[in-house]
Amino acid sequence: MSGLRAVFVCFVVMCVAVVSPAAAAAVAPGWSVLPVPAAVPPVTVSDLAARGPREAWATGYEHAADGLLRPMLYRWDGAEWGRDASFPGVGESGTLGKVQFVGEEVWIFHNRAGAGEILRRSAVGSWSVVPLPQTLRIYQDFTAVRGAAWVVGEDDTGVKVLHYDGDGWTAQSVPDGVLYLMGITARTATDVWAWADTSTGTAVLRWDGTAWRDAKVPLPANSNVHTILFEASGRVTIGGSRYADGVTSTYVMTWNGHSWRTTYPPLGGAHAGALARGPDGALWLPLRSDRAFQSKYARVDGSHTTFSYGPKRTNAIAVQPRALATAGFSLLSFGIAEIYGSKPNLMSERLAERPRGLT
């Protein structure tokens, strides 16, 4: 009997060794709740960006008591989230969009009662405004780097690409056949990528400092692009979705400097707009959770995909992170949670990572 028991114990240990990585991924301890001062619901989260463990900014807008939209801005200082009400136009109708770090400054796109402008916050906390040269009917996206910024959208004459060189604005032309620009992101002032709807399907465009051209990225057939990520190593990651045989699938494309590699993680067709590179080197994406009281995240590391849930929230009926950002050795999320009996409001969570090399 003792011999049989020993065999059984060994079998159990072997099974635990085999399934424990997946099981650990399923419960993934480490996510914690970060309280966020409430906004006026319903609220919309636009973007989240972090620069180190002690500075992150989240943007969006709320519905004020007068029924108008009001811009909202939150700052993470490494210990807590606080609402910032110091920027120009804070009490006026409008929304805040993408936020980026440019040198020592923070740049944020501001739709101020229909007129577009860029808010700039200096290292000492003072604000300045760069107004756009014209009002657009749609402001689709914004990006900025040292020495340059771009705003893409539309007016009654069609697609608009507005370029700021630090002194003034110019309008740039796009290739023939471009119907709509869906997003834009810049690595440098002479290396900018945009994704567009064209007469022949979705395409990636690239600005080389002289002109916009088709980058000839081999996107999957019948696909859309949701985001493009640049990294210091030179790696480029594209996240999007493909529609085939009546099914929508999420795809990830990676450029290693020589060629593109496309994978299809088992993400159920999730929108990849919030795709982010985590402090662990893997790609992370918030998902629509199958648990009403917990958020859900996917971790994609090459061909290996695992899932984790955020903290349980009492009486929650929906928890939906909208944006992710790496802050030092932590991964921050910012989004919306709805508690039974209340309107949806803001939420934030953090996954703390142990610095590499430490045990």
Image (cartoon, grey):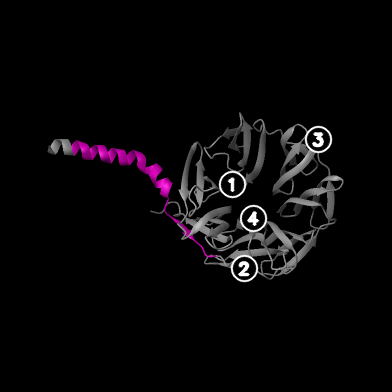
How crowded pointer 4 is (Cα within 10 Å; few <14, some 14-19, many 20+) is rated as many
Depth order, front residue of 21/233: 21
Image position, residue 317 (x, y; %) = 51, 55
What residue is pinned by disc 2? 83
Depth order, front residue of 41/99: 41
What residue is pinned by disc 4? 47
**Does residue 16 belong to the magenta stretch?**
yes
Tag 4 near tag 3, CB within 8 Å: no
Lower position in the chain sequence, tag 1 or tag 3: 3
Lower position in the chain sequence, tag 4 or tag 2: 4
* In this picture, residue 169 sits left or right of residue 110: right
Lower position in the chain sequence, tag 4 or tag 3: 4
Give the amino acid at mark 4.
Answer: Asp
How crowded pointer 3 is (Cα within 10 Å; few <14, some 14-19, many 20+) is rated as few
Image position, residue 297 (x, y; %) = 51, 48
What residue is pinned by disc 1? 275
- Please state the extent of the stretch shown in magenta in the rendering: 6-35
Lower position in the chain sequence, tag 4 or tag 1: 4
Please tell me whether the stretch drawn in magenta is mainly helix, strand or loop.
helix
Q: Secondary structure at mark 2?
A: strand
